[in-house]
Image (tube, helix red, strand yellow):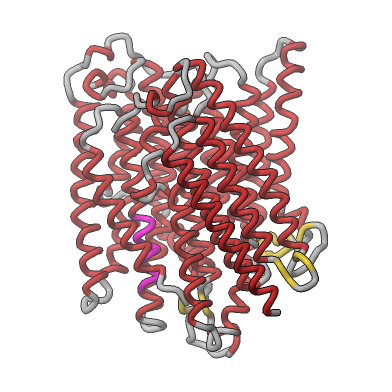
Amino acid sequence: MQELAQIQAIYIVTSVILAAVGLYCIIVKKELLKIVIGMEILTSAVNLNIMVMGLTNSGVDALAQSMAVISMTIGACVAAVALALVVNVFRHYQTTDVRKLRRLRW
Amino acid sequence: MTAQVVMYPVIILLSSAAIMSPLGILEGKLKFKQLKFILTIFSLTSCLISLLTLHQQVSSEGHIEAFLYGFGLPFGVQIYVDEFSVYMAMIFCSLGLLVAIFSYRYMEVDTGLDKYYGLLLTLITGMIGVAFAGDLFNLYVFWELMCISSYSLVSFRKYRWEAVEAGFKYLVMSTIGSLIALYGVSIIYGCFKTVNMREIAMRLTLAQAELSPSAILSLYFATGLIICGFAVTAALVPFHTWLPDAHPAAPASISAMLSGVVIKTGIYAMTRILFTVFTVSPSRVVMEMGSHLIPLVDYGVILTTLGVVTITVANFMVLRQRDIKRFLAYSSIVNMGYIASGLGIAAYLLYHYSGQTYELAVTAASGAILHILNHAIGKGLLFLSSGCIVHEAKTRDIAKIEGIGRKMPWTGLSLTIGLFHLAGVPPLAGFWSKLLIVWGGLSCPQDLFLLISTFIIIINSIYAAGYYLWLVQRLMFSKFGPATEKAHEAPLSMVAPIVVLALACIVLTILLPWVLPMVKVSTLALLGGG
């Protein structure tokens, strides 16, 4: 029981660090593709957290596994839409630098 | 009642969306271009009919629970339909139908209309699914269905830089929001090993006395994550920056959907989770009459503060706008603030004055829920008519379209009714919903927090009425602007939904004595009393 709690704590800390890395990536990076990668890291952090929360002595809860799988699928869909938009941004601006996307204000 | 029957609205819309793309190919072969439109109208109408049947069933027999695929608790996918979910689903579906009729002429210059109608149907499917979801993860899946459709629809005119840029901004912000909300859901799952909302509420009730401080802390953390996550789509103030860009960039029909119902889904999901999950009901354990629900976590303060800040900040931003759609977008943020603060006041009253002020909490919450309907009608009307104006004048600058209401009498008159409705000019329904919220807020004169926030709400409503009337003056009574010379009335299929919505404003006002009990029943379903 003690061991399980320890493992769980380690993974929870990992997922929090991953989420922080993802958010940092989205906020700080100037490259659109890196922003999309940051979103993917955030998705992985959430998926990891779901799996950790379902951890029991006899493996991971089936509910947590199914939730994580569906969440991964949804993350892939969002990434596909995001990449399609990045392609369109490149067509308009000939760059994927987010600092050039400043025409919308107020 | 099997699960499939309850899911009819979702199944109809989703299957129509799935056959939309093959239908587009078939249309090209047959040289008959109206098939997509006919299928959309047909599926939305049949969805509305099945929702009406469901509404009758729910109002006669109470809520409906069903599990998909035969798995029970704690694994099953639960569909839970009560009065509030049917109320919301009917708003979504009716506005979707009107928007589809509007799109027929409005979108005729665009290509790829099979994708447009398909995405519109999946958007409505997602919203109805959110309203029907009985467990947190199911809600998240439908939520993402809605979000992905709306990202694609905002950037539908991908040949314009504005649409692509606003769409990407919306995608990044909204995805972070939903992931943060999912993080909160995973924490709740970790605490209770189930994601079923009512099961969690039951376990919380049973374990109420033995909850350790660390468990309470993690519940507060989860509440904060869920509020922040859904507040992005609900456009409450620190998270609102995507909205004023996305609304003008989207086609007018889609801005009407976004502003009319999609942002309401954010507030629906937030309050549904908060009121259902974090609410301890003594009556579930001790079957004694007169005991009311007490929220376990004090989320009322957070919601009210967020709402009041939203109203104030967005009101300051509105008058800076020179673009009619940005003007309307900021006024949507203001109205979301009213709804959030109304529900927040209700939660605050329940938490701090448990039991004594139950009726007043119901009053404030029903004001907020009536305002959801009012704003869906009013803002749908305003965005559709601004779409007509932009279609004729080819510009969104308010200075250039002054006086256009006189060139387009039907649109102008409907726009005026809509603006009066949202300004809260007394006989119209927009006034009564704000009055109910303020009434709930003024119910405890000894409570300084409620008093101050209600005072700010009142000041802001008066100020808001001022700028709505300013817009009426500019559009209806000013001298003709440069862009109005060639303007004339929009085609019939664009004017008809607008006139229907304007009539709905008036009919809603007349039918208010009958609508209010229905709203109150929905409120009781949300607050879990009655």
Report the number of discs.
Answer: 0
Residue B347: in magenta span: yes
- Image position of B115 with respect to B512: above or below: above
**B161, above or below B321, in the image:** above
- The spot of residue B479 in percent (x, y) is 17, 19
**Quarter occupied by the N terminus of chain B:** bottom right
Is B89 or A22 nearer to us in this picture? Answer: A22
Q: Is residue B452 magenta?
A: no
| In the image: residue B287, left or right of residue B301 | right
Give me the residue at 61% from left, 52% from top.
B140
Q: Is residue B181 left or right of residue B441?
A: right
Relative depth, front residue between A59 and B37 = A59
Q: Main secondary structure of the magenta part?
A: helix
Percent of width and height locating residue B490: 42, 19
* Left or right of residue B445: residue B232: right
Q: Residue at x 67, y 33 (%)?
A: B42
Residue, far right: B70
Q: Identify whether B68 is placed above or below B207.
A: above
Q: Position of residue B79 (x, y in %)?
A: 69, 59
Residue B483 percent across, percent down from the top left: 27, 13
The quadrant in which residue B323 appears is top left
The region drawn magenta spans: B338-348
B80 lies left or right of B213: right
* Residue B468 in view, yes or no: no
